[in-house]
Image: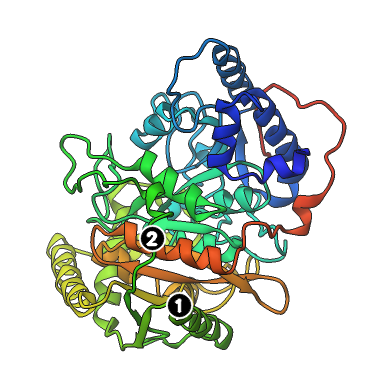
Amino acid sequence: MDSLELAFTPAVEQADLIRRRVVSPLELTELYLARIEQLNPKLGAYVYVAAEQAIAEAKAKTEALVSAEEPLPPFYGVPISIKDLSPVAGMPCSYGVKLLKNRVAQTDDGIVTQIKQAGFVILGKTTTSQTGTLPYSEPDGFPPARNPWNLAHTPGGSSGGAAAALAAGLCAVSQGSDGGGSVRGPAFCCGLVGIKPSRGRVSHAPVGDRLSGIAISGPLGRTVADAAALLDVMSGYVPGDPYWLPDPEPSFLAATTRPASKLRLAMATRFEPIGEAAPICRQTTLDTATLLKSLGHEVEPIELALEELIEPFKIVFRSVLAEVGAPFFILDKINRWLWWRAQFTSCGRYLRAVSKMQTVARQVVNQLMPYDALLTPTYMCPAIQVGEFAKLPAHRAFQEIINWVAPCPPFNATGQPSIAVPTGFTPNGLPIGVQLVGRPGDEATIIALAAQLEAAQPWSHKRPSIANQPLATEPVPVEATADSD
């Protein structure tokens, strides 16, 4: 197997190769670090490359492999990226804020602890939008993250760097988080699988939930199996969590091979008051519905009344900027505007917004309960250009953001699991895809459904041309590196 094929080998298969001693953690880590060194300057996917830490960890794992007892952790020695909203001890954690770019975290986020326990080697921190609030990853003071399929376009956000790194073969799998589409949107933009888990599936430990249950960590993978297996790692209750779900039986990875059964599916391509999805996104949803029918499922169109979710969701979403106490002067244009509006949100208004959001969410869940899953576009149109919304006045940019991401935030409000799956490309080569939304707590059904779509129209073998460039011959530097302005 050549280095390019190895870089794009699914993470679950890489773990198997390591268990069988066909490839070592050090070989994989050195391969990805070499690819990062060559491609990251063009992509802006990583804001910090933990070369020294990753090499040391991979060497230790490789040496231990000689006498390691079975069973090994599920992803022993497999390289992963961590979004720059989750602290990793010994690495900077900036949250996309320039003044914090050199602040080194002293402890691990809870999700990072679980990832380490699963045996992963952490390659570094990936680019996010400032404080994770925007669906593109262009934080002031950092290079913008760019889409490997077309460098003029965004890989999405706020997990944009995570998606760009994964799509370009700069890691085996990526960790992200989703408060309004921040895993599903980048998956859509970069031709990947992204899962927003059910509320309570993944813990917020050791910190609290700052967004009334709308945000959660989630996996990005090049295959459904990779994303499902990483969700298995990330899932689990920590004592004191405000929401929790029992561990799945069997695993989410097992759901990818579950025998197909006939499902009753709903479909929506129109989201009032935004309107109809762009023709190409609507058409790919209709084409996917046709494919699902050919696989034996029922699909029926429905209308979703989501207008009443928009205002309370905005109030809850922007209030986090006031809650974390970020000084006004360090924020970028749109976040300053959101911060300013949050200053005029009283405690009573915030609580009324939470109550209204929960009330409407119940109505949406009840409307969808007769169906096994809902099919929608992931976003309303394909990936925008880098800087496209940043040029607009803040209020207009925020409205354009709402118009673009409309199919995603409602299911952060409801807490339902959602998965973004690729379906094809636009005429100019940008990935597009669809979203599957499940019943509360039922990731397994939509993961199994996504696996059926993947088997019917495979996508993981497709790679952006930038990822196919031959590696330079220079040795990989082992000192830690960080992108400069």
Q: At 31% from the left edge and 54% from the top edge, which residue is drawn?
A: 320
Classify residue 62 as left or right of residue 276: right
Residue ranking furthest to the top: 67
Where residue 351 appears, x then y in whole percent?
A: 14, 63
Compared to residue 450, the image places residue 402 above or below, namely: below
* C-beta proximity under 8 Å, tags 2 and 1: no
Q: At 49% from the left edge and 84% from the top edge, which residue is drawn?
A: 290
Classify residue 454 as left or right of residue 245: right
Which image quadrant for residue 381? bottom right
Classify residue 272 as left or right of residue 227: left
**Whole-Å distance between the Cαs marked 2 and 1?**
15 Å
Residue kind at label 1, given as amino acid type: Leu
Residue kind at label 2, given as amino acid type: Pro
Which image quadrant for residue 31? top right
Where residue 141 appears, x then y in whole percent?
A: 61, 48
Classify residue 226 as left or right of residue 410: right
Compared to residue 65, the image places residue 136 above or below, namely: below
Q: Decide which of 62, 71 is in the foreground and name it.
A: 71
Compared to residue 20, the image places residue 44 above or below, namely: below
Where residue 364 appears, x then y in whole percent?
A: 22, 76
Say which of marks 2 and 1 sits in front.
Answer: 2
The residue to which callout 1 is attached is 292
Q: Which mark is residue 110?
A: none
How many numbered discs sit on the rendered protein?
Answer: 2
Q: Earlier in the sequence, mark 2 or mark 1?
A: 2
Give SS at disc 1.
Answer: helix
